[in-house]
Image (tube, grey):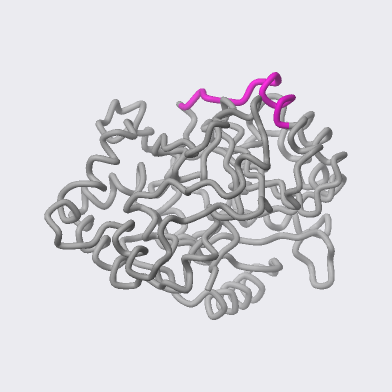
Amino acid sequence: MIKSLHKRESELAHAKKQLDILSNGIFKQGELPTFKAKISETNQFPLKAKKLEILQINLGYMCNQTCSHCHVDAGPDRKEIMTKDTMLQCLEVIKNTGAHTLDLTGGAPEMTPHFRWFVDEASKAGIKDFIVRSNLTIITANKKYHDLPEFFKNHNVHVVSSMPHWTKGKTDKQRGDGVFEASLKALKMLNDVGYGMPDSNLKLDLVYNPSGAFLPGNQMAMEKDFKKALLDDFGIHFHNLFALTNLPVSRFLDYLIASENYEDYMYALVEAFNPNAVSNVMCTNTLSVSWNGYLYDCDFNQMLELPVNNEVKHISEYNESLLEGRDIVISQHCYGCTAGAGSSCQGTVA
């Protein structure tokens, strides 16, 4: 298993170094337009926050995996996890927010010590769509997690799970040896309690990220291929597939540089820029909360330590009316969310 950038004491473990790379080089030299310049051409700058619909809470960077593409730089060696006090502050906001979706992510959010308590309490708030983003393998990693499918069912949690491919080779290459088999086992466990089954209200969606320096294909076509392969070969059902573009952040940025694909990948993102995707990018209707309670426009900005451009900086100061209409903080990584059909945590946007 590879180590996180933080554990390796890599320069790219620091957000400032990542931002320096994204701001200089081909962008500073004028070979490619900055994201600000690009959306200014289409009169879409500044990007503005709309009415809040999704509250995404990152419970911590601890994970049982160390995936090669991870923009969070999560792993077993990361110890940042949300405290119960910060969870209580989040719960106050969940009870009073106008957002219809609560989205819990990580790392592996299930590894946070107070995860089950938090889900219990948050589920009482009456959120319309309660998402937990699971890497699947956590379900089989330890006996104490084996009942997660039943726990999710009891709280009507919408499970969104990473699944790079329907083949062992491509999945294990991106996420580590043995991940494919463990993921299949977890999917079957979820199917057994009703998740992902035809006509079931227990939602099970999969997330696809490309395993290399290329953009994802058509989401609808890929979903058909995934469904056919997983059903024919393994008898596994799921509802929807979300195709996400890898953003040049953290370990994926490290991969791009190490493989000498960074400039080519940025060219590909810029050339695939779709102005129609800009108005629907996730930062316009989503607010990201870090493990220590700070507020960001999206999970990627959180990893680049780009806080919201607002007087409200922390969940303890939360004020939805003040946050609405704020200018979204942008940099060149934002091209990833506006390439092709666009990309968000809920899949394509255009």
81 magenta-colored: yes
Q: Relative to residue 165, is residue 31 drawn left or right?
A: left
Judge whether residue 169 can be spotted in this image: no
**Residue 125 versus residue 227 in the image, above or below:** above
Judge whether residue 231 can be spotted in this image: yes
Name the spot of residue 63 as percent of width and height, x first: 53, 35
| Residue positioned 68% across, 24% down in the render | 113
Judging depth in this view, the residue of 123 and 302 nearest the camera is 302
**Residue 322 versus residue 271 in the image, above or below:** above
| Residue positioned 81% across, 48% down in the render | 127
Q: Relative to residue 13, is residue 97 drawn left or right?
A: right
In the image, which residues are magenta? 78-90
Judging depth in this view, the residue of 235 and 228 nearest the camera is 228
Judging depth in this view, the residue of 226 and 19 nearest the camera is 19
> Which quarter of the figure has residue 2?
top left
Q: Relative to residue 239, is residue 262 drawn left or right?
A: left
Name the spot of residue 279 as percent of width and height, x first: 51, 65
Quadrant where the N terminus is found in the figure: top left
| Residue positioned 63% across, 48% down in the render | 133
Count of numbered marks = 0
63 magenta-colored: no
Name the spot of residue 230 as percent of width and height, x first: 62, 70
| Residue positioned 23% across, 55% down in the render | 262
